[in-house]
């Protein structure tokens, strides 16, 4: 794996650590609902899906 791809994965890990940290999660802990789901669930799912997509793109470029 190229060092460039490793650096991208490390940056992604640090970003996920920050986005799933308690103070950031508490920003979305409210009684508001989006599409019938609590806002915090939508936030967690969106961040998780975005991280999966980002890591997939990084690994796809790794195999090229």
Image (tube, rainbow, N blue to C red):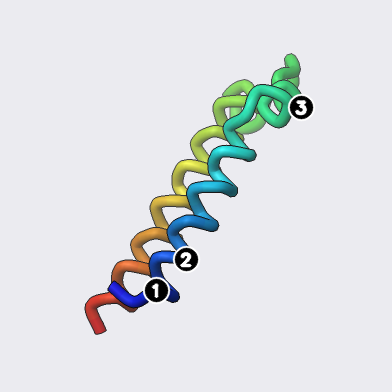
Q: Which residue is mark 3?
A: 27
Query: What's the CA distance linking mark 1 and mark 3?
Result: 35 Å
Pointer 2 with pointer 1, Cβ within 8 A = yes
- Secondary structure, mark 3, is helix
Q: Does residue 52 lie above or below 34 as drawn? A: below
- Is residue 29 rendered to the left or right of residue 6? right
Residue 53 x %, y %: 41, 58
Q: Is residue 13 above or below residue 63?
A: above
Give coordinates of residue 61: x percent, y percent. 33, 78
Q: What number is the disc on residue 3? A: 1
Q: Earlier in the sequence, mark 1 or mark 3?
A: 1
For label 1, the SS is: helix
Q: Quadrant of residue 3?
A: bottom left
Q: Residue at x 55, y 26 (%)?
A: 41
Specify the quadrant that holds the C terminus: bottom left
Above or below, comparing residue 9 to residue 58 in the picture: above
Counting from the top left corner in percent of width and height, residue 35 is at 60, 32
Within 10 Å of disc 2 (Cα), the crowding (few <14, some 14-19, many 20+) is few
Residue 25 image offset from top left, x and y in percent: 66, 26
Q: Nearer the viewer, residue 35 or 19?
A: 19
Q: Which mark is residue 7?
A: 2
């Amino acid at each position: 794996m190229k060092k460039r791809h490793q650096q991208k994965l490390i940056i992604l890990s640090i970003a996920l650590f920050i986005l799933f940290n308690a103070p950031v999660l508490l920003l979305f802990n409210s009684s508001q609902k989006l599409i019938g789901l609590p806002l915090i669930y939508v936030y967690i799912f969106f961040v998780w899906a975005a991280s999966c997509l980002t890591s997939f793109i990084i690994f796809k470029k790794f195999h090229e």
